[in-house]
Amino acid sequence: MALSMTGCGEGVVTAGGSTCRVELRGVNNRHFKLTLRARDTLAALEPRIEAAVRGRVRRGTVQVTVDLSGAAAMPARRLDKTQLAAYLDDLADFCATHDLPLPKSVDGLLGLPGLLVDEPAESSAVDRLWPLVSQTLAAALDRYDQMRRAEGDALAADMRSSCGEIARLSDGIRDRVPDVVAAHRDRLRERVGKLLHDRTSAVSEADVAREVALMADRTDVAEELVRLASHVAQFDRLLDEESPGRALDFLAQEMGREANTIASKSLDVGIAHAVVEIKTRIERLREQAQNVE
């Protein structure tokens, strides 16, 4: 079944005295985009993480958060004493200029940018972390896919319901067309009769039939209804695939074009109302399709 682009999943794995936690959060996007939130020392693993996620996710913006603790934790942050000394010099100058006492503690300065920096990690140490991160990432992806699949099933059920309504309304239009032509023929005869009342001239049945045929040809929507039914059937079949989002969006646009053509040809109020209902459901399909991978 179709997968949703929105979802979240978490994986936690403990091995050899180390614990890794990976969290995934996905939202809609026309293309694939990954953002990694982790210590700077884990930046070297980003290409591997992205490759693993791309193997399971085709579209959407995915945020990956990686946290390590225990023996595998990366080197702790250190205090940049040079930067701290520069801040203290600036503070001393400011206090002297404004006749203020110098603070007795530097606690208030520790939150300033650039004071705490990550120690660079050796590439071999980062490589040794990959098996643990990879295992945790796979567990998070499994839970992420479970949520996306559950939401995708709900989306597919809703879209199938809309497809059924469109098909029902289209059948109603097809059934109504002969009645519309017959009603036009009766109105035409009535108007001609009133115009020619008390006159010697008359209009032949052939003339009336010719005018009705012209009207029927101008308002014929059989081809549009066939194409609309084909698009609806294809849309329904694509919902059984895992990543049909782009194709669904295209088909919804094509359905909209056919509905607009039917509306432009219709002279009947009942058909016009049915087309409005069809277009409402097509718009719902387009909105829902944008959530599908």
Image: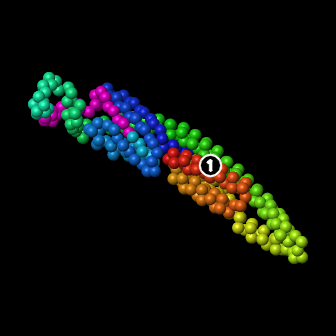
Residue of label 1: 281
User: Magenta stretch: residue 124 in it?
Assistant: no
Dot 1 falls on a residue whose secondary structure is: helix
- In the visual, does 271 lie left or right of 89? right
Q: Point out residue 44 in the picture as x, y percentages from the top left corner.
A: 28, 42
Relative vertical location of residue 270 with respect to residue 141 in this rendering, above or below = below
Q: Residue furthest bottom?
A: 201
Relative vertical location of residue 88 with respect to residue 161 in this rendering, above or below = above
User: Magenta stretch: residue 78 in it?
Assistant: yes
**From where the camera sits, is residue 117 visible?**
no
At label 1, counting other C-alpha atoms closer than 10 Å, the crowd grade (few under 14, some 14-19, many 20 or more) is: many
The quadrant holding residue 156 is top right
The quarter of the image holding the N terminus is top right
Relative vertical location of residue 146 with respect to residue 71 in this rendering, above or below = below
Q: Amino acid at mark 1?
A: Arg
The quadrant holding residue 25 is top left
Q: Residue at x 79, y 59 (%)?
A: 179
Q: Point out residue 99 in the picture as x, y percentages from the top left corner.
A: 11, 28
Number of numbered labels in the structure image: 1
For the magenta stretch, what is the residue range?
64-90
Q: Nearer the viewer, residue 142 or 176?
A: 176
Q: Residue furthest top?
A: 104
